Image (cartoon, rainbow, N blue to C red):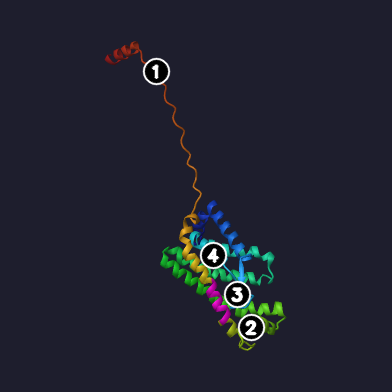
Amino acid sequence: MSAKDTLKNFGKKITPAYITKLAVLTGISFILYMFAKFSLPFMFPSFLDMQFSELPAIFAGFSLGPVAGVLVIVLKCLLKFPFTATAFVGELTDMVLGILYVLPASIIYYRKKTRKTAVIALITGTVASTLGAILLNRFVSIPFYVQFYFGGNFDTLINVFCKPLYHSITRENFYLIYLSAAVLPFNILRLSLVSVVTFLVYKSLSKALHWEIKPRKVEAPAEEPTEQVPVTAEAQTTASENSEN
């Protein structure tokens, strides 16, 4: 199928119901992203927030297609931009990681919608996003945050946020310990919870997520009954004579 045909087929999906569902799921995702988050300071550094804003996005991806899932991720991060405290780096990182989770999972499930495929899809998304988190933290997020918040000094990050949990951590082994003991288990835990909830509740919500606005049927106006003209005896006699002739 050519790119033109793909765009044409996608354009047919853009219905009022599609836009409505996309808007609702994006709104829920933004609320979860903005407000429904918490930390687990006894397990991970306090700046790692547990939040489950990918949940509406994976619902969108499973029910409306991969593009819809990605749109929910992108839109909820864009809505967060005016409230950024990280010069947009945190939101952009979350956008990339959200797409890495939702996109492969949605593509796999959308091709074959079975429970087994759903499990494979959710595991694939979790693995892809977790690997992305390790790479982004190593080469983007941590270098930026250290420079942005601590003026390039790793000591504050290590001694204040990491040392209470990881006693042997130093500047030399920081990335090894932080990525393996914090980023890896944190993302596996967070996305596994999202995946489990998705697996358990998606089918019960599937009917609502596939709701469409059906066009009203216009009924044809009923035909008015033809007025019956009474036939007189004289008319019957005339008709009989005409038929004989």
Q: Secondary structure at mark 2?
A: loop
> From the viewer's perspective, is the residue at label 3 or at label 1 nearer?
3
The residue indicated by pointer 3 is 40
Q: Residue at x 29, y 12 (%)?
A: 241
Circles 3 and 2, Cβ within 8 Å, touching? The answer is no
The residue indicated by pointer 1 is 229
Q: Position of residue 118 (x, y in %)?
A: 45, 66
Circles 4 and 3, Cβ within 8 Å, touching? The answer is no
The residue indicated by pointer 2 is 164
Q: Which residues are magenta?
A: 181-190
Q: Residues within 10 Å of mark 4 (few under 14, many from 20)?
A: many
Q: Tell which circle, 3 or 1, labels the residue nearer the N-terminal end.
A: 3
Closest to the observer: 26 or 42?
A: 42
Q: Is residue 2 above or below residue 190?
A: above
Q: Residue at x 68, y 68 (%)?
A: 84
Q: Is residue 136 above or below residue 13?
A: below
| Rendered-image quadrant of the C terminus | top left
User: Among all residues in the image, which is located at the extreme front?
Assistant: 42
Horizontal placement of 109 versus 131: left or right?
A: left
Q: Tell which circle, 2 or 1, labels the residue nearer the N-terminal end.
A: 2
Q: Residues within 10 Å of mark 3 (few under 14, many from 20)?
A: few
Q: Position of residue 26 (x, y in %)?
A: 58, 60
Q: Position of residue 173 (x, y in %)?
A: 61, 88
Q: Tell which circle, 3 or 2, labels the residue nearer the N-terminal end.
A: 3
Whether residue 3 is visible to the viewer of this picture, yes or no, is: yes
Based on the displayed image, in which of its 4 quarters is residue 100 positioned? Answer: bottom right
Q: Residues within 10 Å of mark 1 (few under 14, many from 20)?
A: few
Circles 2 and 4, Cβ within 8 Å, touching? The answer is no
User: Among all residues in the image, which is located at the extreme left?
Assistant: 244
